[in-house]
Structures are given as C-alpha cells and as structure tokens.
Image: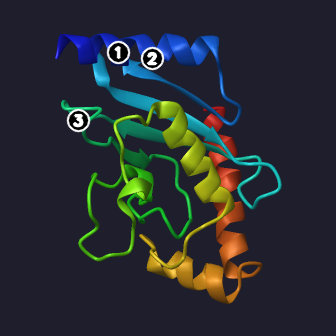
Amino acid sequence: MVELKLFVSFFPQELNKNPVEGFSAGLIDDEDIYKWEVVIIGPQDTLFEGGFFKAYLTFPYDYPLRPPKMKFITEIWHPNVAKNGDVCISILHEPGEDKFGYEKPEERWLPIHTVETIMISVISMLADPNSDSPANVDAAKEWREDPNGEFKRKVARCVRKSQEMAFD
C-alpha cells in the first residue's frame, strides 16, 4: 500500500511538470489521495467547445488494479454520461472479459492507465460519442436521430451553464 500511495501522490506533480492540453487535474484535498477533481475543456471543433466541465475521479484503494470512477459535477448532455453524471467508457470498466461480449479485454481497464490516459479517452469520447452502448439513452437517441437539433441545443445549454459556473 505504501508504494501505491507514493505513486499516486507523486502523479499530480508529474501532471504539473508535463501538462496535457484539454484538462487540469489535482487532489481535492491533500490529505486524501483517492479523490481528484478534474476540469475538462470542451474539445475544439465539437459541440462541447468552450465548455468547462468539472468532474471527480474517485480511485479505489486497490488502484491501479481496478479503475477509478468518474462523475461529472457540471451538467453535461452526452450519450456516454448518465443523467447523474457517471461516465460510462470502456477504459473505466473493470478489467477482464465483458460478460455481455461487447468490449474486448484490452479496451477495458488495465493497470498501465493513468489520469492522463483516462482524460484523453474522455476528451475523445466527448468528440465522438458511442451511441451503441449509452449510459444516457435519451441523449444517444437524439445524437443518432438529429445531432444538430435537440441534442445540439441541450449541449449548448450545458456549455453556457459550465461557462457561468467556471467563474463562480
């Protein structure tokens, strides 16, 4: 457990030394290395562009053997984000075989993943939703049937709200 704590507590400094474009991340409380806050900047040339989406990453005590959970705190309308903010993306699914046969084991959580690889995957998810395996069925339906109609309007509202909240 001590090695794990050293690895995780070292990582925020590593992110600061080698920042990755599109997000910022850090501990919510310096005393709790298992709870992180991230802010994802809506990717350029997507409906989410200009947004500032806050989320929490909660790491299990046996990280990196198991994935963290990610939950958006900022409202976001997306097929792969449940209405309560929980992110549903392969990289955050428990390792091993998918009992439904939808995902390959290598698409799921692997201990080599880091906050950086998770954030890159989530940013990619924002740019390219997977409506075949949705966490938000209503958003997936709107994305498939009319991405430039109701879906676009709801995302634009979330982007505006995120911008207002970013400066509160």
- Relative to 120, 11 lies left or right: left
Which kind of residue does numbered mark 1 sit on?
Phe
59 lies above or below 90: above
- The disc, 3 or 2, on the residue closer to the chain's N-terminal end is 2
Q: Is residue 46 above or below residue 166?
A: below
Q: Secondary structure at mark 2?
A: helix
Compared across the picture, whether 95 is left or right of 120 comes to left
Quadrant (top left/top right/bottom left/bottom right) for the N terminus: top left
- Residue at 65% x, 21% y: name it: 19
* Dot 1 crowding, Cα within 10 Å, few <14, some 14–19, many 20+: few
Could you say whether the residue bearing mark 1 is in a helix, strand or loop?
A: helix
| Mark closer to the observer (1, 3) | 1
> The C terminus lies in which quarter of the figure?
top right
Say whether marks 2 and 1 touch (CB < 8 Å): yes
Instruction: Please provide percent x and percent y for residue 104.
Output: 39, 64
Q: Is residue 94 left or right of residue 50?
A: left
- Which mark identifies residue 7? 1
| Disc 3 to disc 2, C-alpha distance | 16 Å
At which x and y percent is residue 127? Answer: 68, 59
Mark 1 vs 3, N-terminal side: 1
Q: Name the residue carrying label 2.
A: 11
Going by the numbered disc 2, the residue's amino acid type is Phe
Find the distance from the CA under tag 2 to the CA under tag 1. Answer: 6 Å
Residue at x 63%, y 79% (from the top left corner): 143
Type of amino acid at the residue the image marks with label 3: Pro
The residue pinned by badge 3 equals 60
